[in-house]
Amino acid sequence: MHQMAAIRSGAVRPRHQLTVATVSLVVIGCLAVLSAADGSSTGSAFSYFLKTALFGIVGIGLMVFLGRGGRSGNGGLVLAHRFTSILLGLGVAGVIFVMLPTPITPTINGAKQWIVIPGGFTLQPSELLKPALVLHLAAALARDPWRVRSWTELRPVLLTAGGVLGVIGMQDLGSALVTGAIVITILFIAGVPMRMLGLMMLGAALGAGALTLMAPERVERFTVFLAPFADRFDAGFQITNGLMAIGSGGVFGHGIGESLQKHIIPEPQTDFILPVIMEEVGLLGATIVMALYLWTITLGLRIARESGQPYDRLVAAGLTSILLWQAGLNIWAVLGIAPLTGVPLPLISAGGSSEVLILGVVGLLIDIDRRTSMGAGALVVPTEPPRVVPKPVAVPVADSPRTAPPEPQPGELRVVDQRPAPSEPIAAPSDASAQTSPHDAARGSNAPATRRRGSVSGRRRSPGRASAAADTAPRVIERVGGMEILADGTVRLPGGRVGRPKSPIALPDGRVLMPDGKLVSREQAALLVARAAKS
């Protein structure tokens, strides 16, 4: 109700600000491509500007289509969720197809990453895999949030992500690094423990190192990153000229269209467009571009935080991380902080498929914010965690006859056998032992006896033989604790069961009933037990 009231009062939602920031970046990108492509050797600046503007218009149309929403909240996110598996399959198939030697999958600038279509346009399938993988992982983790508990339960998610990363990394290490960072971000938002995330990042680093060593050009790029000016006229030519363009721009730059290094940097309208911008508009213009990226990313994270549905929150965080890591890796590369990977600057570098898909990502973020403000229902319902079957507990084996029995507890009675004991003279009990405690007298002979591990399992007397057995039954010496101590050393419980104790029994009145039927004090019982152990 509070959110609906805010909307009716004209409050500015994050989706409105996100639209302004995104369109601003698209306009800046078109102007930057028009200026930077003047130094391109593969086409005219105006043709690159037209293509960039065309893809920008198509991308903005896709953004509006996916973010349209509706009164019921059904919009682009519902559509994307419905076709997640198809998008993921198309992305994987496209990346594999790019690696095949076909006429429409040429090697451009030493890399096989694009599919050439009629009209001079190119498609990069790895760009489709990023949002498709985000949608797939978000659905899996929102449906089964308990999977983050252990490696075993998280295995299906990790196998899918690892397979996609392996396919991308075979032909585009830069996109694989960005995608891996996106996967780690989603797992972090989903609640995976930090120790597991640390091991995942270590494994990803080892995998990236192995993929780097498999290709000589990747090894050369990493070597140049460590010392770019050592080979400034060969392998370090692009990075060194980019750094000189950044340094010569100063605070205010040389003016729009007045860059000199764009005529030296190879294909400056692609992933090295930021040095051209900084040379022409200086640090001030670059700060505006950085602020727009920071504003966009902050709004995406705000949309994720305000979302009340786990699936919407994971999708928003994952899509925002695409902008974060792709822009961050490009900026770090041109500043010499990271090796060159060929990752374009989102919404600014010339590249049709990247720009259209990034604008589609923004459209999904807009739709998530619209769903949140309208209180739309959950697209993915969490399931109950599987019932954990407790491990069987080993039953302790009974003590061996040679092992000393454990210390008896009060009221505990163990039976050696059920045969009647041979008659033996019983000493008359002392006055102290013959007296019944007031507590026992109050309870009476029918008070229930306390039994623990051991119990009397002797024979119950049948009613028909009660009169015949009365004459031959041993006489009762004493009643204590609800038990009857008989003259033959056995003990009778209230139910009529009779047995012989296996070990001394501590009684409530402070005395101890010995296995031979004698009642002694605790001190005497300790001495008798010690003598028996020595013998």
Image (cartoon, rainbow, N blue to C red):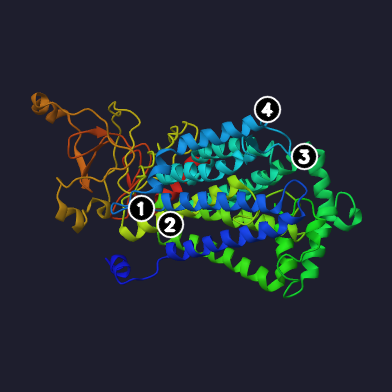
Asked if disc 2 and disc 1 are in contact, CB closer than 8 Å, the reply is: yes
Residue density around tag 4, few if under 14, some if 14–19, many if 20 or more, within 10 Å: few
Asked if one can make out residue 29 in the rendered structure from this viewpoint, the answer is yes
Q: In the picture provided, is 119 more to the left or to the right than 151?
A: right
Label 3: how many Cα within 10 Å (few below 14, some 14–19, many 20+) = few
Please give the residue where the numbered disc 1 appears in the rendered image: 69
Q: Inspect the image, locate mark 2, and give the three-letter code of the amino acid beneath it.
A: Ile
Query: How far from the left and from the top, in percent, is residue 44?
Result: 72, 50
- The disc, 4 or 1, on the residue closer to the chain's N-terminal end is 1
CA distance separating discs 3 and 1 = 42 Å
In the image: residue 336, left or right of residue 93: right
Between 356 and 150, the one lying in front of the other is: 356
Question: Could you say which disc has been placed on residue 100 in the image?
Answer: 4
The structure residue drawn at horizontal position 54% and vertical position 48%, both measured from the top left corner, is 356
| Residue labelled with disc 2 | 366
Classify 129 as above or below 469. below
Q: In the rendered view, would you say 377 is above or below 151?
A: below
Is residue 232 or residue 395 the one in the foreground? 232
At label 4, the amino acid type is Leu
The residue lying at 34 percent from left, 38 percent from top is: 516
Residue 504, position in %: x, y? 37, 43
Q: State how far apart marks 2 and 1 are (Cα).
A: 9 Å
Specify which label sits upstream in the sequence, 2 or 3: 3
Q: CA distance from mark 2 to mark 4?
A: 37 Å
